[in-house]
């Protein structure tokens, strides 16, 4: 991969657009698949207002509306960044991407939240390299094609599964991806035990997200400052910390759990703007929530290991019931 890498971004929303922009800035050839904002991006590109990188207009090398269209000229991509939400309870995410994967050497970069997201792609593409990513970015789409981005653009990633990490070809893949990210001024961290990073993030997402919805549309700061909600989040986090330690084979933290959780809450509470969990944003906009990969999959892992997670099970049940009512799927 000595020439400019060819990237396809599957999901040109708030997350995909920022990293697509930076990859192109670094010299990569970048195509984007858009959905609701397709016409706006096709006609005008992305207008991005970034605290970290400054304002800019990002014109992708190509803009497509479907995965099939992205390979209509038999184009083979070096990397496909999957930036769409993972909703396997509705549709297999690997099936959505499948039309754009024409070569077994195409690297599938999974920029999605949750636990167990890799299994769908491993089953569909057993020969393709898979790179799960833990994404840290503060961005949102203010209107179609307009992106507001803050100070953070960081990716932690590694080869799935870790026993393949020392394979020479896989090393080259990670080196090329890191090169392309750094060239675009994206903070890049290669990890061998990626699952620890993913579980650390799910400790936040699988607690603040569901509680923000079931409590009645509270943002994270409001939850932290309410004693009852604060304790509920803490109890859920303790369950996930215990589970994470067993699954990853490493301690989530050397600190006592209560002290570690207090640190998370202090950091979240002191963010410049109150954090609104993406799960709550989806609920408010009557969109399906990522409760399968963020909440249910960890619960399933716990059940297989014989670890009790009653708080998480309760949150999941309430979350699904609220979603059914919100989306009207509780009716015959």
Image (cartoon, rainbow, N blue to C red):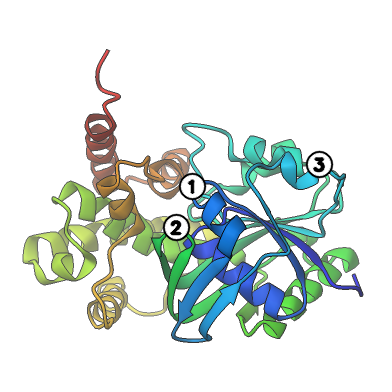
Q: Determine whether 96 is above or below 282 in the image.
A: above
Residue sitting at x 46%, y 45%: 293
Instruction: Choose the circle earlier in sequence order: 3 or 2.
Output: 3
How far is the residue under mark 3 from the one under mark 1? 21 Å
Where is mark 3, residue-wise?
Answer: 72
Image point (49%, 49%), residue name? 85
Per the image, label 3 sits on a secondary structure element best described as loop
Q: Earlier in the sequence, mark 1 or mark 2?
A: 1
Q: What separation in Å lies between label 3 and label 2 (alpha carbons)? A: 25 Å
Q: Quadrant of residue 265?
A: bottom left
Answer with the quarter of the image where residue 238 lies: bottom left
- The local crowd at label 1, few if under 14, some if 14 to 19, many if 20 or more residues have their Cα within 10 Å, is few
Relative to residue 230, is residue 62 drawn left or right? right
Residue at x-position 37% and y-position 59%: 205
Q: Is residue 101 left or right of residue 315?
A: right
Tell me the quarter of the picture where residue 42 sits: bottom right
Q: Are marks 3 and 2 in contact (CB under 8 Å)?
A: no
- In the image, which disc is placed on residue 36? 1
Q: Nearer the viewer, residue 172 or 165?
A: 172
The residue at which mark 2 appears reads as 144
Nearest the camera: 41 or 177? 41
In the rendered view, tell whether residue 105 sits above or below residue 321: below
**Residue plotted at (65% across, 35% down):** 95
Above/below status of 260 relative to 223 = below
């Amino acid at each position: 991969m000595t020439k400019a890498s060819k990237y396809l971004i599957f999901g040109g929303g708030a997350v995909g657009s920022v990293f697509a922009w930076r990859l192109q800035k670094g010299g990569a050839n970048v195509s984007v698949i858009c959905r609701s904002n397709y016409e706006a991006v096709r006609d005008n590109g992305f207008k991005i207002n970034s605290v970290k990188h400054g304002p800019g207009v990002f014109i992708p090398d190509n803009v497509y509306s479907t995965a099939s269209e992205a390979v209509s000229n038999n184009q083979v991509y070096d990397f496909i960044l999957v930036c769409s939400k993972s909703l396997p309870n509705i549709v297999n995410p690997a099936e959505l991407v499948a039309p754009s994967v024409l070569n077994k050497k195409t690297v599938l970069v999974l920029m999605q939240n949750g636990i167990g997201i890799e299994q769908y792609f491993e089953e569909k593409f057993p020969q393709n390299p898979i790179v799960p990513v833990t994404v840290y970015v503060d961005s949102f789409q203010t209107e179609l094609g307009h992106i507001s981005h803050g100070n953070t653009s960081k990716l932690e990633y590694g080869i799935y599964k870790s026993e393949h990490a020392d394979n020479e070809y896989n090393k080259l893949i990670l080196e090329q991806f890191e090169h392309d990210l750094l060239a675009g001024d994206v903070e890049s961290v290669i990890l061998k035990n990626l699952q620890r990073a993913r579980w650390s993030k799910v400790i936040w997402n699988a607690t603040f997200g569901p509680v923000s919805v079931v409590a009645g549309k509270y943002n994270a700061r409001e939850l932290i400052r309410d004693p009852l909600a604060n304790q509920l989040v803490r109890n859920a986090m303790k369950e996930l910390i215990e589970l994470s330690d067993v699954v990853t084979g490493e301690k989530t933290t050397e600190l006592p759990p209560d002290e570690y959780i207090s640190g998370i809450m202090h950091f979240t509470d002191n963010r410049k703007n109150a954090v609104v969990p993406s799960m709550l944003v989806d609920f408010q906009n009557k969109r399906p929530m990522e409760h399968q990969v963020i909440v249910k999959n960890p619960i399933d892992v716990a059940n297989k290991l014989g670890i009790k997670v009653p708080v998480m099970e309760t949150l999941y049940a309430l979350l699904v019931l609220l979603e059914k009512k919100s989306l009207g799927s509780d009716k015959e």
